[in-house]
Amino acid sequence: MLTGALAALAATLCWTLASSLWRRLPTSLSAAQLNLFKTLLALALLLPLVALRSWSAPAGPLVLLLLSGVLGIAAGDSFYFAALRRLGTRRTLTLDAGGPGLAAVAGALFLAEWPTAGQWLGLGLISLAVLLVARQRPSDGLVLAGSAAGQRRGVALALGALVCGSGGALLARAALRAGEFDPLQSAALRLAAAALVLLPLLRTLPPLGQGPRPP
């Protein structure tokens, strides 16, 4: 339990720092194109670590992991990057904090993994905070021209990222319970599936030297 909690906190810290860096990145790439390059880079870093490992698992868990990568990484992260550009880091991350609550409910319904009373209380407080932030007015300059439509679209994209990310996590959890993949292998398979789906975007890359897009 302690190892899992520490790993979750470390993952949260890494995701927060990475989100702040992505928000400041001056690029002409679309959110999905940026996601593709992020996925390819992560996959290149992981492959040397898993290439010599033993790979044996039933087809069912393998399919679940691949679907998890398509839903959680290819779709979810693309929505997340798009939301970052419209809402900024703070609001996007706060909305994304609703993911554990959604994943907990889905895990209870589909995997029979019921949270304790204390965990339900924590999830309720997180969900309340997410609702409060979603209703806040955006800071000046975060949404193009202060557009209410841009604000609503950003919130919709963040919620789409939350749903896709939670769905991907649920599929990955189901695969890990049924199969024999270790965490590195699971991550590599999810990244490979996402990269394969996003790969056609390479044909739509902007010309070299094109300036960065507005937030």
Image: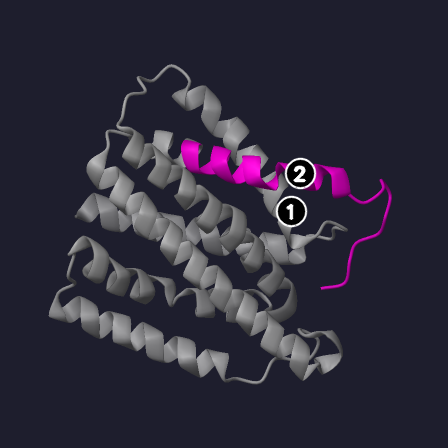
Does 39 sit above or below residue 127? above
Query: Quarter of the image containing the C terminus?
Result: bottom right
Q: Is residue 149 left or right of residue 175?
A: right
Give the residues in magenta. 189-215
Q: In this view, does 68 lie to the left or right of 181?
A: right
Q: In which quarter of the view is residue 132 placed?
A: bottom left
Q: Is residue 25 left or right of residue 176?
A: right
Residue at left offset 24%, top offset 46% = 4
Does 101 sit above or below residue 137? above
State yes or no: residue 205 in magenta: yes
Residue to which mark 2 is pinned: 200
Q: In which quarter of the view is residue 123 placed?
A: bottom left
Which structural element holds mark 1? helix
Foreground residue among 60 and 21: 60
Mark number for residue 164?
none
Foreground residue among 115 and 62: 62
Can you tell which of label 2 and label 1 is closer to the viewer?
A: 2
Residue 61: x and y in percent read: 29, 35
Residue 210: x and y in percent read: 86, 48
Does 134 sit above or below residue 71? below
Residue to which mark 1 is pinned: 34
State yes or no: residue 75 in magenta: no
